[in-house]
Image (cartoon, helix red, strand yellow):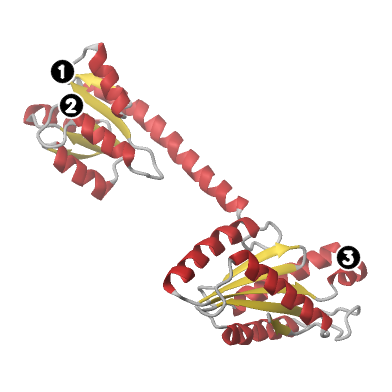
Amino acid sequence: MKVLVADDDPGSLMVARAAVERSGHDCLTAADGDEAWALYLQHQPDVVVTDWMMPGMDGLALCRAIRARRADLYTYIVLLTSQGSRDDVLAGLEAGADDYVTKPLDPFVLHARLLVALRITTLHADLAHYRKVLSQQARTDPLTGLNNRLKLSEDLEQLHARSHRYAEEYCVAMCDVDNFKSYNDIYGHQAGDLALRTVAAALVGTARETDGVYRYGGEEFLLVLPNQSQLGAKASMERALDAVRELDIAHSGDPTGRLTLSAGISAFTAGHRADAETLLGEADAALYAAKAAGRNRVELAL
């Protein structure tokens, strides 16, 4: 672990450092609270062992400052104090300390506290990892690996707010695999799943790095195109449709004999500052227009 020890008493600081390093951990030292806070921000230690009474920021203030930060990993705090009354102990714990050690410092006691700290910080690191994994899974379509509608709603809300604030254009493109029900009926659902994964990869392959590609539901996909005009979005989607056609996935139930895609595009512009839900509805209506016009094409919202 990386351990930060803060104490304005040089002797106590030396004893604490020796105990930390003898326990096999890396040690940073600070002679006052302000230095400790600066080192904490720079190095993000796993454990902070801090004296209560110090020049500048005292131990309680340091505890509160650490707990006020939103960090992915947990910092275990041990408060060193010569004030061992119940009220003082409670004040330290309420300020954010996990444990306390009375002075003069006993190296064995600090070693024992560090063993506990290692267990707690490891547990918190594991929990943070699992939270991250679960958060990613909740926002990922399991079939295609694309972002799902939950992630779409989050991303689109942020993009819309930014575009509205800075008067930037963006487009949304709703896509649908043509005659996909008949494809499943003819070739089976396993082939249908493989086709959706392949189409998803083709869409990602033609998208810009800043574009978002999402599985909207069933055989529908949605692309979010930041800083893109409607005509630019149409050119982008024409390339996407070409990429799907070039996959040359046989589809005897389609007039073209292969799997194709239709798309509808709506745009947020200076003259059309519609909300995100309206844009999605307009893109969906444009998609239906593309279907009605014969499929395998891109239509713009009116």
Amino acid on which the number 3 mark rests in the picture: Gly
On the picture, is 144 further left or further right than 110? right
Are circles 1 and 2 on residues that touch, CB within 8 Å? yes
Q: Where is mark 1, residue-wise?
A: 82
* Residue 225 placement: quadrant: bottom right
Of the image marks 2 and 3, the number of the one nearer the N terminus = 2
Residue 70: percent from left, percent from top: 37, 44
- Element marked by disc 2: loop
Could you tell me which quadrant the N terminus lies in?
top left
- Element marked by disc 1: loop
* Number of residues whose C-alpha sits closer than 10 Å to that of mark 3, classed few (under 14), some (14–19) or many (20 or more): few
Residue 196: percent from left, percent from top: 75, 68
Amino acid on which the number 2 mark rests in the picture: Trp
Task: Name the foreground residue: 84 vs 154.
Answer: 154
Q: Is residue 197 visible?
A: yes
Q: Where is mark 3, residue-wise?
A: 188
* Residue 278 placement: quadrant: bottom right
